[in-house]
Amino acid sequence: MISNIIVIVILLIIIASLFSGLFYMLKDHGRSNRALKALTVRITLSLLLFALLMIGYWTGLLHPHGLIPYH
C-alpha cells in the first residue's frame, strides 16, 4: 500500500513540475532558465519513478496487473 502512495505522490509532483515549466515558458518568454530547471526536475523525477517501479517489481513489492489475465 505504501508503495502505491509513493508512486502516486511522485506522479503528482511530476505533473506539477510539468505545469510549472509551462507557466514559466509562457511568463518569461524565454528570458530565464526557470522553465529549463522545471523540466529538468520533471525528467529526473520520471527516471527516478521508472527506477523505483523496476526495483519494486524485481523485489516483489509491486505486481503488474492487466485487463487480460494470464492463462
Image (spheres, rainbow, N blue to C red):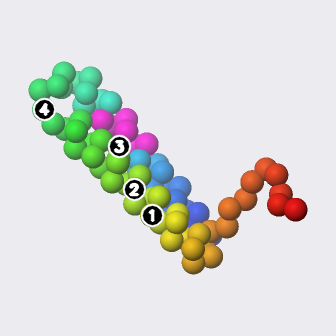
Label the magenta part by its dominant secondary structure: helix
Q: Position of residue 50 (x, y in %)?
A: 47, 58
Which residue lies under the disc numbered 2? 47
- Amino acid residing under circle 1: Ala
Cα distance in 3D space between marks 2 and 1: 6 Å
Extent of the magenta region: 15-21
Quarter residue 17 falls in: top left
Circle 2 SS class: helix
The mark closer to the camera, 1 or 3, is 1
Q: Earlier in the sequence, mark 4 or mark 1?
A: 4
Residue that badge 4 annotates: 32
The residue type indicated by label 2 comes to Leu
Indicate which label's residue lies in the foreground, 4 or 2.
2
The residues bearing labels 4 and 1 have C-alpha atoms spaced at a distance of 31 Å
Q: Which residue is mark 3?
A: 17
Could you tell which of marks 4 and 2 lies nearer the N-terminus?
4
Q: Nearer the viewer, residue 64 or 24?
A: 64
Q: Which residue is mark 1?
A: 51
Give neighbour class at mark 3: few <14, some 14-19, many 20+ (Cα, 10 Å). Answer: many
Q: Position of residue 9 (x, y in %)?
A: 48, 56
Quarter of the figure that contains the N terminus: bottom right
Q: Position of residue 6 (x, y in %)?
A: 50, 63
Q: Amino acid at mark 3?
A: Ser
Q: Please give the name of the residue rendered at 12% of the width and 26% of the height, measured from the top-left corner.
A: 31
Q: Is residue 17 magenta?
A: yes
The CA distance from mark 3 to mark 4 is 16 Å
Q: In the displayed image of the protein, which residue is found farthest to the front?
A: 71
Kind of element beneath mark 4: loop
Residue 9 can be seen, yes or no:
yes
Q: Are marks 4 and 2 in contact (CB under 8 Å)?
A: no
